[in-house]
Amino acid sequence: MNLEVEHSAAGGRSALIPRGELDLETRTIVLTRGTELLTALDPGSQLVIDLREVSFVDSSGLGVLVALTNNAASLGCAVIMLNPSPAVSKLFDLTGLDKAFVIERDDIAS
């Protein structure tokens, strides 16, 4: 498997931190952990998905990110895509998801 996932929570925000490739083989891990974090959040809270160390995302991986975003909205929460790697940013641009996702960059990524 080409993916590791960590998570943390603080101050109304939970963070999901995948490292590696988000694809057909690894999508279930991200969906399961992301869903667990979302269901533990209070309405109005945020799930941050830190994508700085994700080197590859295929269509099934994009589906997971869309599903988590939709699930969050139904729970009254939000998903923020933090620091997408250059490859992931390009994919978001090509698919138009750069307009559908909330994308943030912090000072570390600059």
Image (cartoon, rainbow, N blue to C red):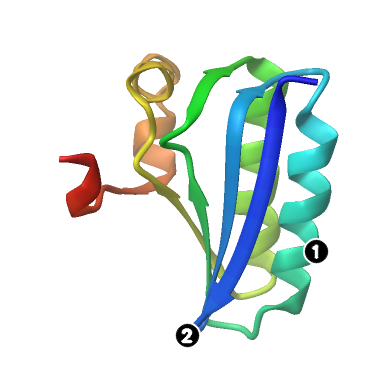
Q: What element does badge 2 sit on?
A: loop
Type of the residue with mark 2: Gly
Q: What element does badge 1 sit on?
A: helix
Q: Nearer the viewer, residue 95 or 14?
A: 14
Q: Nearer the viewer, residue 82 or 71?
A: 82
Identify which residue is drawn at 52% across, 80% down: 10
Q: Which mark is residue 11?
A: 2
Above/below status of 64 relative to 7: above
Q: Which mark is residue 36?
A: 1
Above/below status of 26 relative to 72: above
Percent x, y of residue 30 = 74, 42
Count of numbered circles on the image: 2
Identify which residue is drawn at 68% across, 66% down: 74
Asked if marks 2 and 1 touch (Cβ < 8 Å), the reply is no
Residue 4 is drawn in which quadrant? top right
- In this rendering, position of residue 47 left or right of residue 36: left
Crowd tier of the residue under label 1, counting other residues whose Cα lies within 10 Å: few below 14, some 14–19, many 20 or above = few
Percent x, y of residue 2 = 72, 20
Identify which residue is drawn at 24% across, 53% down: 106
Percent x, y of residue 64 = 70, 36
| Quarter of the image that includes the C terminus | top left
Type of the residue with mark 1: Glu
Identify which residue is drawn at 45% across, 18% down: 95
Above/below status of 57 relative to 5: above
- In this rendering, position of residue 84 left or right of residue 41: left
Q: Nearer the viewer, residue 93 or 28?
A: 28
CA distance separating discs 2 and 1: 17 Å
- In this rendering, position of residue 105 left or right of residue 25: left
| Quarter of the image that includes the N terminus | top right
Percent x, y of residue 57 = 58, 19
For marks 2 and 1, the one nearer the N-term is 2
Crowd tier of the residue under label 2, counting other residues whose Cα lies within 10 Å: few below 14, some 14–19, many 20 or above = few
